[in-house]
Image (cartoon, rainbow, N blue to C red):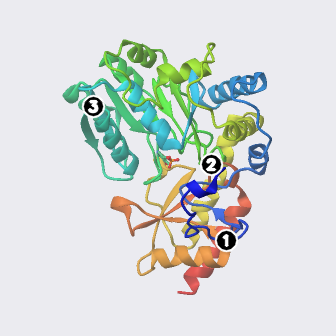
Amino acid sequence: MSSQTLPPISNKHQISALQLDVPPRLLLGPGPSNAHPRVLQALGMRQVGHLDPSFITLMNEVQELLRYAWQTDNQLTVPVSGTGSAAMEASLANTVEPGDVVLVGVNGYFGERLCDMAGRCGGDVRRLEKPWGEVFSLDDLRAGLETHRPAILALVHAETSTGARQPLEGISNLCREFDCLLLVDTVTSLGGVPLFLDEWGVDVAYSGSQKCLSCPPGISPLTLGERAVEKLHRRKSQVPNWYLDMTMVSKYWGKERTYHHTAPINMNYAFREALRLVAEEGLEARWQRHQNNAELLWEGLAELGISCHAPYEYRLPSLTTAIIPEGVDGKAVAVYLRKNYNIEIAAGLGQLGGKVWRIGLMGFNSRQENVTLLLAALKDVLGSF
Ligand SMILES: *Cc1c(COP(=O)(O)O)cnc(C)c1O
């Protein structure tokens, strides 16, 4: 190497950074939640190549375990390389063709994001609105389908911004009657809230790793049922996003094993362990655990004079929107909890900004001792204001 021909190296950005050290936070906000220790251990294992026979076995296991968690037999069930928003974008990029009417149930922040993404895919976006914290009835949805005649109906099962659970039973019959696909966001429900994709006739669903699955953010499941795959194959235009194009990605996850992009190997290790934990515990026990710990939280909050924003009937066990009592500085409380207890909870978004705290009890974090600690910390902070 002849250094004479190279320009001088700039040391402007050559900082001397310290060895990584992070505070031991208990993440009880809307996500990420703390990863299970076994998941973190799997993440650190040595790599194999992305077409190594051992990795292909692992890929198949990930897909099978994901089908169990979602209660689906869908062939096209894969983890997308990216966070929940990547799978969200993939769900729309693959199914929406320019000009398709996409009817989105907007009753929280993530409904808004669905509208944004569907519009970017060239969809003719129509909004079905409800105040944040409420859910859509079958009558609401029938009226929306009648008015808009969409190709796709998109709903959020677990609205992380409001703490409300959208019931899904019966919707697929409506969608079939109006010949449209049912697309559902299950980011804050998968692994924490009862979910039966096939039984409930969901055609397209996506989720994230970092909420009730207790895996770090960076990988996110996506599944397309037969009707959605047919629509994908009938497309007249290419999927507008190369990276998320399931006609290509599915060939890597399918029999062909054709290289598309390098799978995030270690994230798949971690994700496999997270899904293995779901299968080991069993869905019924896992859902019950989330419900029990949420009930404990709600009772404790009530004793502190704090009520919940979402009605009990539709209240998510994984994410609680707790109404900030009159005269209390919600932000200051969150800062106090972080500084004094290493606990993270979050503020409200949009319509609920300044009105609620968002408290997550997701996956590994849904444990009685976490509820007890948070309630004690809240009692302490509310007494000290
Ligand atoms: C968190 C979340 C997303 C987005 O996931 P990221 O991992 O933040 O990209 C999408 N939908 C819902 C309902 C969520 O809670």
How far apart, in angstroms, are the residues tagged by discs 2 and 3? Answer: 37 Å
Which label's residue is closer to the chain start, 2 or 3?
3
How far apart, in angstroms, are the residues tagged by discs 1 and 3? Answer: 48 Å
Residue in front for this viewpoint, 334 or 94: 94
Residue in front for this viewpoint, 40 or 54: 54
Quadrant of residue 114 within the rendered picture = top left
Which label's residue is closer to the chain start, 1 or 3?
1
Instruction: State whether residue 74 appears in this view.
Output: no
- At mark 2, the secondary structure is helix
Reading the image, the residue beneath label 3 is: 123
Residue 355 percent across, percent down from the top left:
40, 68
* Mark 2 or 3: the one toward you: 3
Q: Disc number at residue 16? A: 1
Q: Residue at x 26, y 25 (%)?
A: 100
Instruction: State whether residue 179 appears in this view.
Output: yes
| Mark 1 beta carbon near ligand 1 (under 8 Å) | no
**Label 2: few (<14), some (14–19) or many (≥20) C-alpha neighbours in 10 Å:** many
Residue type pointed to by label 1: Ser
Reading the image, the residue beneath label 2 is: 291
Residue type pointed to by label 3: Gly
Q: How many marks?
A: 3
**Label 3: few (<14), some (14–19) or many (≥20) C-alpha neighbours in 10 Å:** many
Quadrant of residue 97 within the rendered picture = top left
Quadrant of residue 122 within the rendered picture = top left
Please report contact status of discs 2 and 3: CB closer than 8 Å, yes or no: no
Residue 58's place in the image compared with 341, above or below, is above
Residue 243 percent across, percent down from the top left:
48, 32
Residue 371's place in the image compared with 32, above or below, is below
Residue 70 percent across, percent down from the top left:
59, 30
How far apart, in angstroms, are the residues tagged by discs 1 and 2? Answer: 47 Å
- At mark 3, the secondary structure is loop
Residue type pointed to by label 2: Gln
